[in-house]
């Protein structure tokens, strides 16, 4: 895992990239890239983190993410199947002056708003979802035309939410990226054991109080909450393997069944047994 700049190249024979992505239990991937990105979640639900915006998303989520806006992979924290259709492109994917043409005025405005991240709903989302699915089987020219139709729909709807404050700008420090990467990697490798926050703070070259403030600023959650969330996601996976609740509790790093049950219900809205029963059905 690496918190990093993601290198993106257009598909061969195309001016943009189209991805049909299927995954299960993705790792945490906090990244950014200069390309714009449309993400449609065709199957699955989970946690969405774009810039400073955090929320739970459901199947059918549609977002338009602007350049260099940090975000996680949508498959992180998802239990079971997860499927996305993703379009990635540069602003000048059809030429440096393309968005300056008079016919593109509204689409140019859409691209500006996307710099803060946009989440769409309602009729617009359904129309775009249908067109994205259609693009998967189209030749290159037809799918480019379909993409322009998608931008036209998104540019002319008011069925959207801006995810970050318009004045917010995100600056990147490779030092910060390397630091938070070490922390995430440590949790993934050691979540089954008792984790001493002093050890983690030393990994980040910070004192414990400074590390706690730093981690909350970067992730908008406490370090303890992050570890518990990771443990519960792993517990969900083990419960689907038909392991007893007590065994799962200790296997993912909890040393108290009562605390495990309470934390699980806070994060998933169900007790471990209720979750297991629902997933089996």
Image (spheres, rainbow, N blue to C red):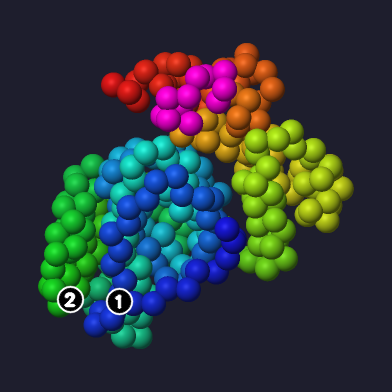
Would you say residue 246 sits in the magenta stretch? yes
Does dot 2 land on a helix, a strand or a loop? helix
Q: Is residue 103 above or below residue 37?
A: below
Q: Is residue 42 above or below residue 245?
A: below
* Residue 32 x/y as whole percent: 52, 64
Instruction: Name the residue that disc number 2 marks.
Output: 140
Which residue is depicted at the point 58% across and 65% down? Answer: 4
Which residue is depicted at the point 24% across and 52% down? Answer: 157
* Residue 113 x/y as whole percent: 40, 60
Quadrant that contains the C terminus: top left
10 Å crowding of disc 1: few (<14), some (14-19), many (20+)? few
Q: Check residue 42 in the rendering and tell me which mark sits there, or answer none.
A: none
Would you say residue 124 sits in the magenta stretch? no
Q: Going by the image, does 150 lie left or right of 255?
A: left
Cα–Cα gap, marks 2 and 1: 10 Å
* Residue 48 x/y as whole percent: 46, 45
Say how many tags the image has: 2
Looking at the picture, tell me which residue is in the foreground, 35 or 149: 35
Looking at the picture, tell me which residue is in the foreground, 59 or 111: 59
10 Å crowding of disc 2: few (<14), some (14-19), many (20+)? some
Label 2 close to label 1 by CB (< 8 Å) = yes
Q: Going by the image, does 58 lie left or right of 134?
A: right
Magenta span covers which residues? 238-248
Which residue is depicted at the point 42% across and 25% down? Answer: 242
Instruction: Name the residue that disc number 1 marks.
Output: 11
């Amino acid at each position: 895992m690496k918190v990093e700049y993601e290198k993106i190249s257009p598909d061969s024979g195309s001016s943009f990239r189209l991805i049909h992505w299927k995954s299960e239990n993705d790792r945490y991937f906090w990244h950014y890239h200069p390309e714009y990105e449309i993400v449609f979640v065709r199957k699955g639900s989970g946690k969405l983190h774009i810039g400073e915006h955090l929320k739970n998303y459901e199947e059918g989520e549609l977002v338009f993410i602007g350049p260099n806006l940090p975000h996680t992979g949508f498959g992180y924290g998802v239990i079971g199947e997860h499927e996305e259709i993703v379009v990635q492109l540069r602003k000048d994917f059809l030429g440096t002056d393309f968005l300056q043409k008079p016919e593109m005025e509204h689409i140019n405005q859409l691209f500006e708003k996307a710099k803060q991240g946009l989440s769409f709903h309602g009729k617009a989302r359904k129309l775009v979802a249908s067109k994205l699915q259609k693009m998967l089987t189209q030749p290159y020219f037809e799918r480019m035309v379909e993409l322009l139709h998608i931008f036209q729909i998104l540019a002319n709807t008011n069925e959207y939410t801006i995810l970050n404050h318009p004045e917010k700008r995100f600056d990147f420090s490779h030092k910060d990226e390397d630091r938070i990467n070490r922390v995430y990697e440590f949790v993934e490798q050691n979540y089954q054991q008792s984790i001493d926050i002093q050890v983690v703070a030393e990994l980040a070259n910070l004192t414990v109080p400074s590390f706690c403030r730093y981690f909350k600023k970067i992730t908008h959650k406490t370090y303890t909450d992050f570890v518990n969330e990771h443990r519960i996601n792993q517990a969900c996976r083990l419960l689907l393997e038909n392991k007893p609740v007590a065994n799962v509790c200790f296997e993912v790093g909890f040393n108290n069944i009562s605390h495990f049950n309470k934390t699980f219900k806070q994060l998933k809205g169900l007790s471990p047994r209720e979750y297991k029963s629902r997933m089996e059905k």
